[in-house]
Image (cartoon, coloured by chain):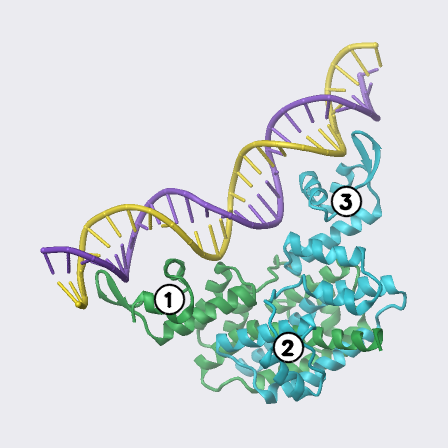
Chain colours: A green, B cyan, C purple, D yellow
DNA sequence: TGTGTTGGATAGTGGTGATATCTAATATTG
DNA sequence: CAATATTAGATATCACCACTATCCAACACA
């Protein structure tokens, strides 16, 4: 299909598609001539991914490109690819050599403190932000969160496909795309409980 | 304290503080004269909240103002205030009269489907985005998530303060500030499990 | 042969978060 | 008391970003 049809199929305007091509978010179509390229179903899907990552997950174009690069060239192992992908997701965190809040929490939960994990840094950042807002998370609360989150994570990992490429793409996109779902579920439960306790 | 000291205390530049004042994120100081105002600890805290909401939670200045307005004038009941605050948090969702994906999930979980809840709309949006990315959430998975998330939410609500004002501010800021913590915990668990299964 | 679309390049748009500059008024210091 | 510095408040400017618009020669198709 030509670019105008890709535009019709995806709802993205032709100039926007050209923009994605320029920015390297969308792989070029197969060149039919100097002035014509053929796009296929992979392009349709890719545009959907781009729009979901930017609009719903809230990534910038740059972050989206970073995530998609990991999906396209994941490297040999899941752990490395996952870490790389997390590095493109917010919050962006400056490197340091110790993350005291995160370490305390992780040790309290009996998990392994590993400062090299990107997620460790992001946890530190998130805990610091909660403190700054005036709603710090105490140990008892984190002790409650921990097992529930771990159970969710184990279930996630159990469902990752076997083949390495599919696994990486699934893990990377799943992390970004499923977080808003979990957040929405929690908000929904809050709102529901609040409605029941408020009104009657 | 004068604005320069507030700047020193918070790390925000004087022009930035003036910007927050102009935009209505920061309440004015007590005017000492035509060219001098006194700021206090409430201003220091408020700047911390603003920076955490914008930098870590990722809200725009406009969204932050919306959330802070709810905190400042919450209205009489928690449910309304919470809904209003959620409306300022991403993802922004166009209104509709039915949210089929969300309804299916909510009914499957045995919760109450209430299309008026902002969180219902946000759930629909998040589920649609996951589909678009190619990693839809099946019923079985949501059935696993549901109880864990609900347990977390109940624990959250149990710890909300009794006094209405404190409760609302806690609920609103807590929702925004604790989501990144939960997300980071889940990412950490993923990365940890991936590290163990990959390397050995 | 003519009409119209394409790829590719370049430039422009609107919004946003933050700075910079300016002025008159007021503290502070020597 | 004079000189210097700092402030509030207003206006203007900046850099960035995600797009969008325009233009052109090359080409397809009727």
Residue found farthest to the right: B163
Mark 2–mark 1 CB contact (< 8 Å): no
Residue at image position (21%, 60%) is A34
Residue B189 numbered mark, or none: 2
Q: Label 3, on which residue?
A: B9
Q: Are marks 2 and 1 on the same chain?
A: no
Q: Residues within 10 Å of mark 2 (few under 14, many from 20)?
A: many
Q: Is residue B158 left or right of residue A109?
A: right
- Read off the chain for label 1: A
**Could one spot residue B49 in this view of the protein?**
yes
Residue A7 numbered mark, or none: 1
For discs 2 and 1, the disc positioned in front in the rendered view: 1
Q: Tell which of A196 and A117 is nearer to you.
A: A196
Is residue B137 placed above or below A102 in the rendered structure?
A: below
- Read off the chain for label 3: B
- Quarter containing the N terminus of chain B: top right
Label 2 or label 3, whichever comes before in sequence order: 3
Secondary structure under tag 3 reads helix
Location of residue A13 by image quarter: bottom left
Q: Tell which of C10 and A108 is nearer to you.
A: C10
Residue A29 numbered mark, or none: none
Q: Position of residue B8 (x, y in %)?
A: 75, 41
Secondary structure under tag 1 reads helix
Secondary structure under tag 2 reads helix
Location of residue B184 by image quarter: bottom right
CA gap, disc 1 to disc 3? 51 Å
Q: Tell which of B183 and B176 is nearer to you.
A: B176
Q: Residues within 10 Å of mark 1 (few under 14, many from 20)?
A: some
Is residue A103 placed above or below B102 in the rendered structure?
A: above
Q: Position of residue B43 (x, y in %)?
A: 80, 47
For discs 1 and 3, the disc positioned in front in the rendered view: 1
């Amino acid at each position: 299909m030509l670019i105008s049809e890709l535009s019709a199929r995806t709802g993205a305007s032709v100039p926007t598609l050209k923009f994605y091509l320029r920015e390297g978010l969308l792989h070029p179509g197969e060149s039919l001539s100097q002035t014509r390229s053929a796009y296929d179903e992979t392009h349709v899907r890719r545009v959907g991914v781009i729009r979901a990552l930017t609009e719903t997950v809230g990534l910038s174009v740059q972050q989206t490109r970073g995530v998609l690069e990991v999906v396209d060239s994941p490297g040999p192992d899941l752990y490395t690819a996952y870490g790389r992908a997390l590095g493109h997701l917010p919050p962006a965190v400056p490197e340091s050599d110790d993350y005291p809040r995160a370490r305390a929490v992780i040790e309290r939960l009996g998990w392994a403190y590993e400062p090299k994990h990107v997620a460790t840094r992001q946890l530190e950042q998130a805990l610091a932000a909660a403190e700054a807002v005036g709603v710090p998370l105490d140990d008892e609360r984190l002790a409650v969160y921990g097992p529930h989150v771990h159970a969710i994570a184990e279930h996630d990992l159990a469902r990752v496909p076997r083949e390495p490429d599919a696994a990486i793409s699934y893990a990377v996109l799943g992390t970004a795309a499923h977080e808003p779902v979990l957040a929405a579920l929690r908000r929904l439960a809050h709102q529901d409980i609040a409605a029941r306790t408020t009104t009657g």
